[in-house]
Image (cartoon, rainbow, N blue to C red):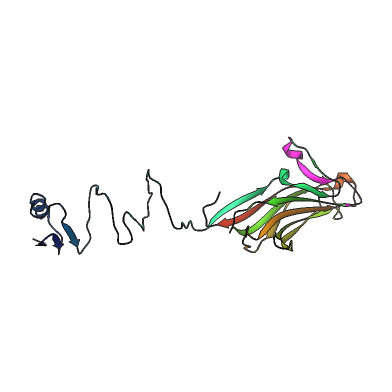
Amino acid sequence: MGYENYSEHFVYKQLLTYQELNQLGSNDEYFKSGASVSVGGAWTFGGEINCPTINTGHGAVECYGMNQDVKTTSDVTFASVSLGSQTRYYTIDLSDFLRYFGDMKISGAGNVSAYSWSLNSTTSEGRIFAPLHLPHNAELSEAKFWWENMGTSTASWGTACIEKYSMANEFVTQIGLEVLCGTSEGTSCGTISLADHLISNDTYKYVAYVNISENQPVSNHVRFLGGCITYKITDLAP
């Protein structure tokens, strides 16, 4: 046979045949309570393995290197979990913005096609802002802002930017800026590259700003329609 019995231990030197396994299974001398088994090669089973614990040498009941779904009805504790890089999107809705200064107004609530922020003045500038609540350690990729140019003049324009504020001293750093301007009527989208900026919620707070500056009739103004930030995350985050 391909095994030897040393007291309470079995040492298997080669692949056992069905007849050998069958003989072992019927031999209480070799299969008795408390015996240990040492295997020098791989075992292949066609059915289930039932045992109270599995010790892989890295701790009891620990399984690793599994490329399949894992199911359990018990609580699970991990020291760390790596998901790989996951792309997520953060919508900056019009309702997230607050008026900062100027005669800025939001209009068209309840009417998707008319819902927008605009400046109700022909002589001044206006600004709105929205606090950003992005996950800690998120890696920013880009921000997109949509606006509608109501006239054909480039004198009707605005800017959108992402900024961060130090909570220690309120020092402001601009992460990216996009000019909202067009030479013809219609909806446009501007993209800000955020250069893989890493979110640090323990040190900074983050804000999106939109400025609109006009010297055209109100009917020709820029209307701001909303924005979206693309980011990547490797942590378990909503």
Quarter the N terminus occupies: bottom left
Q: Which residue is outermost to the right?
A: 123
93 up-or-down from 66: above or below = above
Q: Which residue is outermost to the top?
A: 110
Seen at 77% across and 53% down, the residue is 210
Front residue (pair 189, 40): 40
Please check the rendered image and state whether residue 231 is part of the magenta-colored stretch, yes or no.
no
Please check the rendered image and state whether residue 123 is part of the magenta-colored stretch, yes or no.
yes
Seen at 8% across and 49% down, the residue is 26
Residue 81 located left or right of residue 192: left
Residue 109 appears in the rendering: yes
Residue 101 located left or right of residue 130: right
The number of callouts visible is: 0
Residue 187 appears in the rendering: no
Image coordinates of residue 232 in percent, x first then y, are 57, 57
Magenta stretch in the rendered image: 110-124
Front residue (pair 15, 139): 139
Q: Quadrant of residue 4?
A: bottom left
Image coordinates of residue 107 in percent, x first then y, are 79, 39
Seen at 52% across and 56% down, the residue is 235
Residue 207 located left or right of residue 157: left
Seen at 7% across and 54% down, the residue is 29
103 up-or-down from 161: above or below = above
